[in-house]
Each structure stands twice: as structure tokens, then as C-alpha cells.
Image: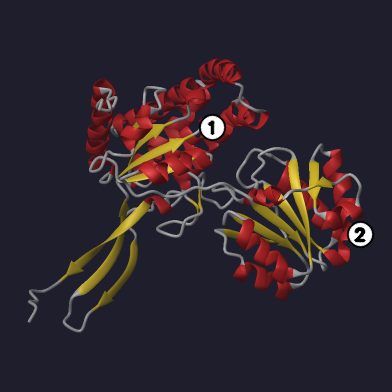
């Protein structure tokens, strides 16, 4: 029987080990960095982004041409594209992170035991964070900025389509670190498009402390199956907006239009509309007016289609689909209980909203929907670290361990116990 040959790229392996060792050394310095130093690095990196905006857009154009050759869809191309406004948003995000309180060395709790020992729980950095993400150049800036604020080192592995853009952004981050007297190796980018580098990262136990995947189902599935390192999960965003029978019609239309169509390619975009049967006949034509005018395709159940002929037939698959496109599924429900059950069964535990003037129904929805973010009378597109006041986010964690919801600087810390005694010994 012929032996199976397992391919192994020794050069890539050594290259990744080198990145890990440099990051480990840089983390030791970052963990001790003063808050003023970290803030200076962020502010100087923001200035560098603005100063080198043309260079970044030139690099981004290379990525766009490469992506066109790979046949990316419209939503993916939108996430990839950079312009002066988006570069300014990245710079402003870094400056906002700099203004936040230092999440490290915070006294989280303190108590004294009967024997006189003083117990303290103190926040500390997570360590070296491996961030694997698809082709969204802004994640390069956001992820690195949040990692630095929390005293971590970061190894970034971007999607192949944003390789040149991310390299240009990392240069600006290095400029900021250097001016602040901090190690440039605190932010490193995997310098190859080779997908084998992801596999290397997932086995770098002892060098990388936590993996954060940010991307589609295939990336997340691979990380969960292969990683030997703990992960902060970011699954898909099958988000719902539920229009309750006591909703204000004008508010409901305005919020839904924003939740679905402001940016269709982000994980906080509403993908499914639930609406009470008792108002469907009157309300759905109004909803269909605003959505169809905005270019949104609607797919609904029988009662939804009976209310408005512009709504196409939905399949069972539609209830579980994250479209990331101008498409929405519409399901009629008997009331809040059915809406909540549907969301908990078909949603991705990301972000779900209710539109209603009935505060008791809203409270029940917010309490019983099992999602990282639940909202009342607001657009699901507020599911964003910047909108939460975090400056930026690495992603929206849909898991339950360590962090849930927007992952900002504070969520990139852990804690240790510090015990003060006066010579106590244990009997």
C-alpha cells in the first residue's frame, strides 16, 4: 500500500514561528506599556493614515483589480473598497480608541478574607492575539488598534483580496508604534496569501493565546474544527426585525429600511422581517413600498404574499439565510411568542430587534431572545463596536465564553488575582 504523503512547507512554518516569537517578545513590552504610550501610538497611527491616504488607495486599487479577477460579488467588493471617507473613519476610530479608559490594570473587585488576606481581581491583557479575517481592510486598523489599547500583540491574517491594502495600513500602525517608543512587532501581518498560513496559526500553541476569526461560515467552520487555540467566535449575522401589532407604522418603515438597506453587506443588516398577522394586510404594502423603492427583493410566506403581490415566494431555506445582499425574507406570526420562537430557532444569536410601543412585550422580547444583542425600536445596524462607544470592534461575538456582542478593547483583556498578606500561613 502506498504511503500517504503529507505536504509541509518548512519555509512557511519557520516564517510563522518567527512571527510568533517576535509577537511574544513584543507582548512582554506592551503589557507593561503606559497608557499614554499606547494612546500616542494610536494617535500617531491615525495621523499616518491620513498622511498616506493616497498610498493606501493606490494599494487598495491593486486589491480591487485582483478581486475582480476572482469574481467577488457586489457586497464583497463594497467591503473591500477604500475611499477618503473610509480611511478617515479608520483614523477617527483609532483616535476614539485612544480616548477610552485604559482597560488594563483596572481593579475589578477587592475583598478581605477573615484571615486578613486582601484579594484583588485585576484586568490584564489577553496576550498574543491571532486575528484571521476576510477582505475588509478596515479590520486591519480596527483589530490592531483595539489590541494595542489592551496591551496585546497582534498577528493579522487578512483575506487574500485585501493583502496590499492591509500592508499599507500596517505600515501606518508601525509608524505610530515607533513614534511612541513601542515595538513595531506588536502588530505583524502574515506576509503571504498562502492559505496554509491559516493552518499554521491555528497550531501555534504557546505563541498565540487566542484566535479571533472574522468572516463567513467557511472560515469560522475551519477555525472551530482545526484550532488548537481558544477562539472568540464570530458567526454569521442572520438578524431579525420584528414589527409587533402595536408598532408605529412610520417608525417601523423607517427603522426597517435602515436596518436592511443602509449597508446590506454587514453582519448587522436585517435579513428577516417578522410581522404580526393582524397588521400584515395594512402594514406590508407600506413596507413593500419603501423596500421595493430601495431595490430590495422580498421573499415571504403565503400570508405575506397575499398582502402584497410584489413579495415573492420564500422557501424554508430563506429563514436561515444571511443574504448580505438586497434581499429580505418576510414571515407572518401570530404574536410575540411565535416571533421569539422563530428567532431562537432560525437566527444566528447575533442581533435581533422589536418595533413596538408596548413596553411589556418589548421587555419579554429582550429577555427571551437568545442573542448577543437585542434591541427595541432601533435599527440592527447599530450592532457595531463604534456605535457602542468602543471606538471600533474586532467582531461581534456570538459565543458565550469570555466575550459576547461587540468585541472592543475591554473584551481583549482577562484578569488575574493579586493577593496581599501579612505573613499568613494555611493550617
Q: Where residue 364 sits in the image (x, y, percent)? A: 66, 73
Q: State which quadrant residue 343 falls in.
A: bottom right
Q: Which callout, 1 or 2, points to the residue nearer the camera?
A: 2
CA distance for labels 1 and 2: 41 Å
Q: Nearer the viewer, residue 257 or 324?
A: 324
Q: Secondary structure at mark 1?
A: loop
Residue occupying the point 26% across, 34% down: 20
Q: Are marks 1 and 2 in contact (CB under 8 Å)?
A: no
Q: Could you tell me which quadrant the C terminus lies in?
A: bottom left
Determine which residue is flagged by label 2: 281
Name of the residue lying farthest toward the front: 1
Quick check: 251 left or right of 103? right
Say if 50 sits above or below 213 in the image.
Answer: above
Q: Secondary structure at mark 2?
A: helix
Say if 383 sits above or below 340 in the image.
Answer: above
Residue 136: which numbered mark, if any?
Answer: 1
Residue 178: which numbered mark, if any?
Answer: none
Q: Where residue 256 sits in the image (x, y, percent)? A: 76, 51
Say if 54 sits above or below 213 in the image.
Answer: above
Q: Could you tell me which quadrant the N terminus lies in?
A: top left
Between disc 1 and disc 2, whose residue precedes?
A: 1
> Can residue 393 be seen at all in this image of the molecule?
yes
Residue occupying the point 73% across, 69% down: 336
Q: Nearer the viewer, residue 175 or 289?
A: 289
Quick check: 427 left or right of 377? left
Q: State which quadrant residue 372 falls in.
A: bottom right
Q: Where residue 75 sits in the image (x, y, percent)? A: 65, 32
Q: Where residue 332 sits in the image (x, y, percent)? A: 80, 60
Number of disc labels: 2
> Can residue 189 be seen at all in this image of the molecule?
no
Residue occupying the point 53% across, 39% down: 216
Amino acid at each position: 500500500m502506498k504511503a500517504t504523503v503529507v505536504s509541509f512547507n518548512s519555509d512557511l512554518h519557520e516564517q510563522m514561528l518567527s512571527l510568533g516569537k517576535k509577537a511574544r517578545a513584543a507582548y512582554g513590552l506592551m503589557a507593561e506599556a503606559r497608557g499614554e504610550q499606547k494612546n500616542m501610538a494610536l494617535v500617531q497611527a491615525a495621523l499616518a493614515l491620513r498622511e498616506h491616504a493616497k498610498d493606501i488607495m493606490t494599494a487598495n486599487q491593486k486589491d480591487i483589480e485582483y478581486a475582480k479577477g476572482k469574481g467577488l460579488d457586489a457586497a464583497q467588493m463594497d467591503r473591500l473598497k477604500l475611499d477618503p471617507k473610509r480611511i478617515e473613519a479608520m483614523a477617527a476610530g483609532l483616535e476614539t480608541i485612544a480616548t477610552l479608559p485604559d482597560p488594563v490594570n483596572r481593579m475589578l473587585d477587592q475583598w478581605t478574607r477573615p484571615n486578613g488576606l486582601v484579594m484583588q481581581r485585576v484586568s490584564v491583557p489577553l496576550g498574543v492575539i491571532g486575528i484571521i479575517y476576510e477582505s475588509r481592510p478596515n479590520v486591519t486598523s480596527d483589530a490592531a488598534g483595539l489590541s494595542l489599547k489592551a496591551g496585546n500583540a497582534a498577528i493579522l491574517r487578512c483575506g487574500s483580496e485585501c493583502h496590499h491594502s492591509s500592508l499599507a495600513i500596517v505600515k501606518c500602525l508601525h509608524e505610530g508604534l515607533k513614534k511612541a517608543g513601542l515595538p513595531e512587532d506588536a502588530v505583524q501581518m502574515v506576509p503571504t496569501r498562502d492559505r496554509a498560513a491559516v493552518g499554521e496559526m491555528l497550531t501555534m500553541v504557546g505563541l498565540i493565546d487566542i484566535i479571533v476569526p472574522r468572516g463567513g461560515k467557511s472560515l469560522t467552520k475551519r477555525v472551530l474544527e482545526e484550532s488548537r487555540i481558544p477562539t472568540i467566535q464570530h458567526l454569521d449575522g442572520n438578524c431579525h426585525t420584528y414589527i409587533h401589532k402595536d408598532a408605529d407604522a412610520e417608525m417601523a418603515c423607517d427603522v426597517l429600511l435602515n436596518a436592511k438597506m443602509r449597508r446590506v453587506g454587514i453582519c448587522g443588516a436585517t435579513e428577516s422581517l417578522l410581522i404580526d398577522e393582524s397588521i400584515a394586510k395594512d402594514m406590508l404594502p407600506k413596507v413593500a413600498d419603501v423596500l421595493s423603492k430601495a431595490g430590495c427583493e422580498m421573499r415571504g410566506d403565503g400570508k405575506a404574499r397575499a398582502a402584497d403581490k410584489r413579495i415573492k415566494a420564500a422557501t424554508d431555506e430563506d429563514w436561515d439565510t444571511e443574504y448580505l445582499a438586497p434581499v429580505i425574507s418576510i414571515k407572518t406570526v401570530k404574536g410575540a411568542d411565535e416571533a421569539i420562537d422563530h428567532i431562537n430557532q432560525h437566527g444566528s444569536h447575533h442581533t435581533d430587534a422589536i418595533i413596538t410601543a408596548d413596553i411589556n412585550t418589548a421587555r419579554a422580547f429582550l429577555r427571551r431572545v437568545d442573542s448577543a444583542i437585542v434591541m427595541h425600536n432601533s435599527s440592527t445596524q447599530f450592532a457595531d463596536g463604534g456605535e457602542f462607544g468602543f471606538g471600533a470592534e474586532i467582531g461581534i461575538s456570538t459565543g458565550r465564553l469570555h466575550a459576547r456582542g461587540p468585541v472592543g478593547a475591554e473584551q481583549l483583556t482577562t484578569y488575574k488575582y493579586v493577593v496581599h498578606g501579612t505573613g499568613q500561613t494555611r493550617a
